[in-house]
Image (cartoon, rainbow, N blue to C red):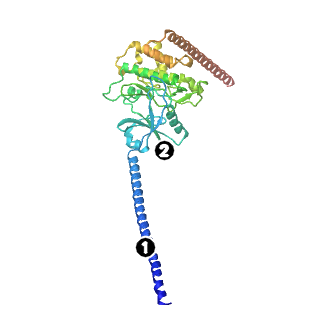
Amino acid sequence: MTAETQSFATPDSQVIILYEIRMMLNDSRGGSRNSILKVILASIGGAVTLLVIIVLFLLWWQRMRYRPEIYIDVPGQHDHNLEFGQIKRFSLRELQIATNNFSEQSVLGKGGFGKVYSGVLHGKMVAVKRLFEVEKPEGEIAFLREVELISIAVHKNILRLIGFCTTPTERLLVYPYMENLSVASRLRDVKLNEPALDWPTRMQIALGAARGLEYLHEHCNPKIIHRDVKAANVLLDGNFEAVVGDFGLAKMMDIERNTVTTGVRGTMGHIAPEYLKTGRPSVKTDIFGYGVMLLEIVTGERAIFPNFLEGAGEIFLNDQVKLKVQVGQLTDIVDPNLDNAYNFDELEKIVQIALLCTNVEPDRRPAMSKVVQMLESNVVPAEQWEEWQVAQLTRRQQDEMREQRRLFSFSEESLNIQEAIQLSGDKYGSVN
């Protein structure tokens, strides 16, 4: 190659080299820009991710610190006596803290389905019922029954359910705390220097409980049978207003069939005789229990084995009161804690109402709405009371006749035995 050719080739080679260098520089600058962009994006992404993690952690921490309240709506009904509200779900930990881990010092009472503890939730006193044997069908049924009925029975004289708690091994119900506990405790467990229930308060309690039962029987759809009406299951708030509680045995009644068939449940002395025989509860069996409770309020005694009249041969309170009424010794049944501070006319009427309610013939017991009317007016229809007296006299005469026949039969049998012994003696005597 000549020098001229070489001098001609050099500029082209330089152009090519410069072009390649420019391309390399451009590639280098582009790569640098891409790398920087990637670093920036990665930094931003990391910061956002970290921020999201921090926010999620703060939300989780806030939620654990202040648990949101979960409510179940309770449908209301149109009635001036109704109180509307919601049922809250509590955690087990909340109720453990509220009751000092269910300490024995917090126990308010114990029943067939559970133990009741006092507690403090969100600064307010509550009563927590801890159900027994929740792993068994009976325990689960009792729990579901109380939660279910609260959606139907909402009334100022019916115990209100605040909330509940469920775990695999626990079923708990939370109610308002009743400052004056139950009618039974205020009648029979009066503490030293604690005043006994006075007469007007007892009449107020009788009326409040009657209104609660009237609501269950006549204003709920379907009707509700309590099945365990007694002084221990009527609670008292701070104003001694009666509140019917403990629906562990309650039943919804088919209005068209008007009865339900179950095993006999309840407390001896409060169970109506026809329920014991047939196992078929009705509103009339509740009315019987209410009548016995009225006698508890008047006498301060238990439904069975009362302290007075122990030699009368009657173990049921209502039977003993009947005896006293029949012999004109009504004042003998009055609770001594009243110190004779009562209205005799009201005493007479409330005992009459109680005996009408405990009539052995269920169809002759008054409906709870009629009981409320009688208590409000302090008037018992004369014809109803006369009818009860006539029926009682007839029943007593029939009992006496049966007793005479039994004694006559026993005497006749004894005479026959004596004659047989005498004949046997004569026979063996003749042999000798």
State the image quarter where residue 261 is shown: top right
Q: In the figure, 139 relative to 393: above or below?
A: below
Which quadrant does the C terminus fall into?
top right
Q: How many marks?
A: 2
State the image quarter where residue 334 is shown: top left
**Circle 2 is placed at which residue position?**
167
Q: Nearer the viewer, residue 109 or 90?
A: 90
Residue 224 at what x, y percent from top left? 53, 27
Residue 265 at what x, y percent from top left? 54, 30
The amino acid sitting under disc 1 is Leu
Left or right for 251, reference 34: right
Q: Is residue 122 visible?
A: yes
Residue 424 at what x, y percent from top left? 66, 23
Which element type, helix, strand or loop, lies under badge 2?
A: loop
Q: In the figure, 30 relative to 17: above or below?
A: above
Left or right for 378, reference 386: left
Mark 2 crowdedness (10 Å alpha carbons): few <14, some 14-19, many ≥20: few
Q: Nearer the viewer, residue 81 or 224?
A: 81
Left or right for 232, reference 391: left
The amino acid sitting under disc 2 is Thr
**Circle 1 is placed at which residue position?**
25
